[in-house]
Amino acid sequence: MAKKKKTFRPKARVPKGLRDIPAATVRAEGAMLARIREVYELYGFEPLETSAFEYADALGKFLPDEDRPNEGVFSFQDDDDQWLSLRYDLTAPLARFVAENYDGLPKPFRRYQTGPVWRNEKPGPGRFRQFTQFDADTVGAPGPAADAEMCMMAADCLEALGIPRSSYVMRVNNRKVLDGVFETCGIVGEGPEFEKQHLTVMRAIDKLDRLGSEGVRLLLGPGRKDESGDFTEGAGLSDNQIERIIAFTEAGGGTRDAVCSAMEALVGDSEIGREGVLELREIDALLTAVGYEEDRVAFDPAVVRGLGYYTGPVYEAELTFEATDEEGEQRRFGSVGGGGRYDDLVERFKGVKVPATGFSIGVSRLFAALEALGKVEENTVAAPVIVLVMDKDAMPGYQKMVAELRSVGIRAELYLGGSGMRAQVKYADRRGAPVVVIEGEDERSKGEVTLKDLILGAQKSEEITDNAEWRESAHAQVSVPRTALVEHVQEILGRHSKAH
RNA sequence: GCAGCUGUAGCUCAGUCGGUUAGAGCGCUUGAUUGUGGAUCAAGAGGUCGGUGGUUCAAUUCCUCCCAGCUGUACCA
């Protein structure tokens, strides 16, 4: 033997920004996804699944002057040296799918898809590096009717999940209107300098809810210093330009018609701006015809979103209620989903313009919100009946009991651990088992089994503090003929399900 | 990435103005009370005091750097 080798013991830990999801949450989230799926199906969308990773260039995140994929995505090289990246959303893979299968698809192509996506970013409370999205998109639909439908469907989803009508709102804007306002403000030009300024302005507007209009003014102008002393460079606009943009973002709040009129005034002669308002008016007409009023879908110039590829109407699903979190702090949930029109995305692959619009739900955030609202469905799966192992020699007989219970649809399991009876009952208690089946020597000699009603027992233990009395209470159990096992278990289960 | 704060048991936290065997509550394991959950009682496991280097007779405590976490901010397709 060589010297004592130190065994390598990896630290058991979940990677930063990832998490394990316990049974109750898996079930409840699954139920939530099923509800959303029903709504998407009802609107005529078809399911599609694509793989977790794609060629990096298909996701479109190569920096022009670098030969490795951008930060923010998880990437690795295949054995032929090609870069692959984990998908960071479901829209880029959809664009790839449509471009790849373009000729074989019915157009418009309508699909829904859910699944995990990954982003290599700094995690925070409620922000993870893996999270689930649930998207629906219509590809090949140029008109505002497709956008209006997205808004209606999103509202329907939230209501299907039990979020009451006054507790959420779809906020809608149009990037063309924003472009129009930029034109009339004289924020125009070409090239990277202009692009950068453009982007800075939009990011600033996006922070309105967090920083307030004063903070946004600073970001539009000279820049802003935060409380830790960190300085963020501003867009360098003039006071006049800043006020016009602030005025635009504050033009929301009224009826959709009123917002459109306000937008018209601010957009002036800008052609693109007028076009944007016209689209919104069309959306308004469609929504109104179906009965979706401002309490469900409102127009709001402060909505900018994602900033990347949107080319027309953009929308955001916002929860408007507040809730108290575990620490007793008031929390607003804000945006739980969003989307918009992206007419250029498929063009990257095909060279042809393929107009598209879609909506994406942030599943985990929405789930957290439902939890706070008390709208999460309780664990509907009953815990299993547990058959104790009193004598190892009697295993075949115990196995037969669970099989009998399962054959009539009762969740049942045989105790598979190695501990004694006390530990077995404790285990059953922790699992939430309603009934424990006991067959020791005594029962077997009489051809009986003992059924212990753990739910009844738990009720009794509330009243009893004395150990002697607890023992006297006979543990809420009955002995029944072995041949009548299934019927009696059913009877006890039935009693408790009726009690609810 | 930048800035500030914080790292002691599985969890929540004491404690040492630098000094001998580092504690509590909860949780966990085993046992007693009946072959039987809760309550009660008893015993037990679990810590290189985040890591490294330094100052010192002596560092969990003071200093350096590193790492991790939290908060704000930036980025977020």
Image: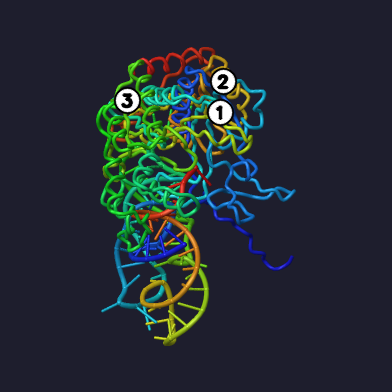
Residue A122 visible in the shown view: yes
Q: Tell me where residue A43 appears, x and y as whole percent.
A: 47, 18
Residue A214 drawn above or below residue B33 = below
The quadrant the N terminus of chain A occupies is bottom right
Q: Is residue A90 left or right of residue A368?
A: right
The quadrant the C terminus of chain A occupies is top left
Q: Are marks 3 and 2 on the same chain?
A: yes
Q: Tell me where residue A159 appears, x and y as whole percent.
A: 36, 23
Distance from label 3 to label 2 (Cα)? Answer: 55 Å
Q: Tell me where residue A158 appears, x and y as whole percent.
A: 38, 26
Q: Is residue A234 left or right of residue A252?
A: right
Q: Are marks 3 and 2 in contact (CB under 8 Å)?
A: no
Chain of the residue under the numbered disc 3 shown in the image: A
Residue located beneath label 2 in the image:
A401
Q: Residues within 10 Å of mark 1 (few under 14, many from 20)?
A: some
Give the residue at x 48% y 28%: A30
Foreground residue among A480 and A415: A415
Between disc 3 and disc 2, whose residue precedes? Answer: 3
Residue located beneath label 1 in the image:
A414
Q: Amino acid at mark 3?
A: Arg
Q: Tell me where residue A349 appears, x and y as whole percent.
A: 63, 37
Between disc 1 and disc 2, whose residue precedes? Answer: 2
Look at discs 3 and 2 and give the one toward the viewer. Answer: 3
Foreground residue among B33 and A341: A341
Give the residue at x 42% y 18%: A493
Q: Amino acid at mark 1?
A: Leu
